[in-house]
Image (tube, rainbow, N blue to C red):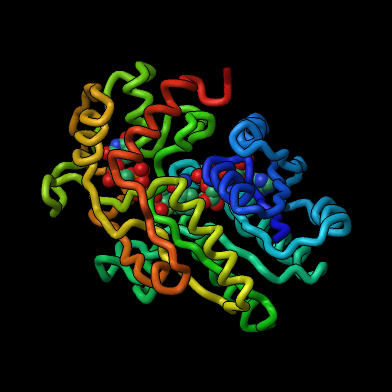
Amino acid sequence: MNILVTGGAGYIGSHTVVELQNAGHNVVVIDNLSNSKAKSLNRVTEITGKKVDFFEIDIRDFNALDSLLNKYKFDCCIHFAGLKAVGESVQKPLEYYDNNVCGTVTLLRALNKHNCKNIIFSSSACVYGNPEIIPITENCPKGNCTNPYGATKSMIEDIMMDLYKSDSNWNIVLLRYFNPIGAHQSGKIGENPNGIPNNLMPYITQVAVGKRDELSVFGNDYDTHDGTGVRDYIHVIDLARGHVCALNAIKENCGLEIFNLGTGHGYSVLDVVNAFEKVNGLKIPYVIKPRRAGDVPVCYADASKAEKILKWHAEFNLEDMCRDSWNWQKNNPNGYGD
Ligand code: NAD
Ligand code: UFG
């Protein structure tokens, strides 16, 4: 298939481009490089041996999208482009609503105009808020998002649902990701956060590489097996392959479908620290700090719907994720910035 990937220079996007090219799809990437480097796509080519057609385009730029869509005929768009830093979204809500929500509306208008009515969207487990059901099924009601970033994901889902109601020629797959970590086994592509990482794994790898002194563990008084927060960490390669499987659903005119992409296993912060230390033979110094505002105690998926319908399940375990995250970081201490 001919696939348009928005945000394809980023962390999940670049891994997905690898899997798409390996599966024989033709890929065009657009990205405004606001949180990535085009170098990631050169690395993709080193892995797959295939060139990536790249255009520096902002999804809010209707005219640029319009002329791209005049030139290429796409079977599906996989839409990763968006800002994703939870804390920053609290400081800069208008930027987040403009970039994520207005950007997606502009993208949908352009796709609609060119009759490309197939889209796979990067949603998030954060739409469940503090989940009512654990493990979380897709039927779990959406919850209150505690930050503008999460609100943009929930709003975009609603916009896409309304679009589908208005025109059932659309096929829309909403993928609710749990916590992607890990990197391609080659060590050539991986997560490249700007500044101080918000997320657990990049923070751990930066402690391991000597950029940060110690990890802060946010809270050890949750009702979990060791008191620290529990999440469903999923290898980014598994996540990327989930998109390739979702294309089959699109091909079969699935209409609007929602899938959780997680492993179904919950690990605590200290489980991750211990696994990282064990598999990599390193020590990660940490201190216990108060709970982080907005964090939920426990969040992990029931991923059986994706298994049943997409024939997809996660194959990598926590040790694989810790090994591959470290392999990326130690080979690229400054990310793509070298
Ligand atoms: P990322 O920041 O590495 O990738 C996003 C890409 O989108 C970047 O390359 C950025 O430059 C680009 N971009 C942002 N705004 C754009 C715009 N207006 N026009 C064009 N390009 C734009 O993030 P990621 O971790 O790869 O996340 C990909 C998607 O998955 C995002 O939508 C994110 O919200 C979602 N998601 C991520 C996680 C996670 O933990 N990483 C979890 C759930 C959902
Ligand atoms: N944590 C620490 N110390 C840190 C960073 C995180 O103890 O330095 C803890 C958190 O308190 C939490 C766990 O590690 O218990 C995971 O935190 P992350 O920030 O890595 O991930 P979150 O679950 O908070 O959120 C992530 C993404 C969101 C996404 C969500 C669900 O940041 O964008 O997963 O997919 F929506």
**Image position, residue 117 (x, y; %):** 71, 71
Q: Which residue corresponds to the image point at 37% horizontal and 74% vertical from the top-left?
A: 141
Q: Is residue 92 visible?
A: no
Q: Which residue corresponds to the image point at 83% horizontal and 51% vertical from the top-left?
A: 64
- Count how many numbered circles sit on residues in the image: 0
Q: Which residue corresponds to the image point at 26% horizontal and 32% vertical from the top-left?
A: 276
Q: Nearer the viewer, residue 117 or 304?
A: 304
Q: Nearer the viewer, residue 179 or 184?
A: 184
Q: Left or right: 99 with respect to 198?
A: right
Q: Left or right: 198 with respect to 60?
A: left
Q: Left or right: 209 with respect to 96?
A: left
Residue 40 to residue 27: above or below:
above
Residue 323 to residue 330: above or below:
below
The image quadrant where one finds the N terminus is bottom right
Q: Left or right: 91 with respect to 112?
A: left
**Image position, residue 105 (x, y; %):** 68, 63
Q: Which corner quadrant of the image does residue 69 belong to?
A: bottom right
Q: Is residue 230 visible?
A: yes
